[in-house]
Amino acid sequence: MRLASAADLMAVQNCARAAYAPYVAAMGQPPAPMTADYRDAIDRGQVWVCVAPDLKGFARWFPKGSALQLETVAVRPQDQGRGLGTALIRACEVAARQAGCEAVTLYTNSKMVENLRLYPRLGYLQVGHESVRPSVYE
C-alpha cells in the first residue's frame, strides 16, 4: 500500500467506476465515487492505493474536525473477497491513530448492503441516518 501519485489517476478512476457500477441501477444514478475528482484528491495526498503489481484497490481519506473521514473504499471486482477493502480500512485507522484523531468516520448508501454488513463487523457503529434528494431538478 502506498500514497497515490499522478500516474495512478486513470487506474484509480477505472477502479472506482468498476467497483461502484453494480449500484447504479439500485440508486438510480452513479454513486459519488464514480464521478469524484480524484486528480485533486491525489494532489492533496488523500488517496492510498493497493498495488500488486497493478492497482487492485484504493481508499480516500482526509481530516475532518477531530476525525479522519474515510470517504471511499474501492476494490476492482476481480479482486474483491480477498480482504483488500478491509486492509484499506485498517490502513485508514492506522493513519487516524498516527494523526491523533479521535475517530474514523464514514458513510454509505443504504443500497450498498455489503457495506452495511461489513462495517459493524469491523467495529463501526451507526450513529445517524440521513436522507438526501439525489437531484433538485427532478
Image (cartoon, helix red, strand yellow):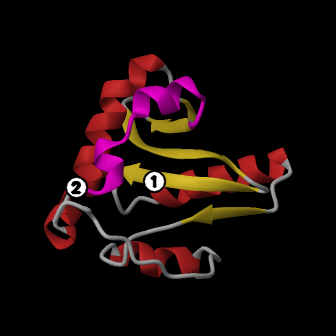
Residue at x 32%, y 45% (from the top left corner) = 16
Q: Give the main secondary structure of the magenta stretch.
A: helix
Count every numbered label the image shows and give the total.
2
**Location of residue 15 in the rendering, given as x and y in whole percent from the top left corner:** 30, 42
- Amino acid type of the residue that numbered disc 2 sits on in the rendered structure: Pro
Specify the quadrant that holds the C terminus: bottom left
- Amino acid type of the residue that numbered disc 1 sits on in the rendered structure: Val
Residue at x 59%, y 47% (from the top left corner) = 61
For label 1, the crowd category at 10 Å Cα-Cα, with few meaning under 14, some 14 to 19 and many 20 or more, is: many
Q: Which residue is mark 2?
A: 30
Residue at x 32%, y 31% (from the top left corner) = 11
Q: Which residue is mark 1?
A: 73
Chain part drawn in magenta: 31-46
Specify whether residue 85 is painted magenta: no
- Give the quarter of the image for residue 89: bottom right
For label 2, the crowd category at 10 Å Cα-Cα, with few meaning under 14, some 14 to 19 and many 20 or more, is: some
**Location of residue 90 in the rendering, given as x and y in whole percent from the top left corner:** 63, 57
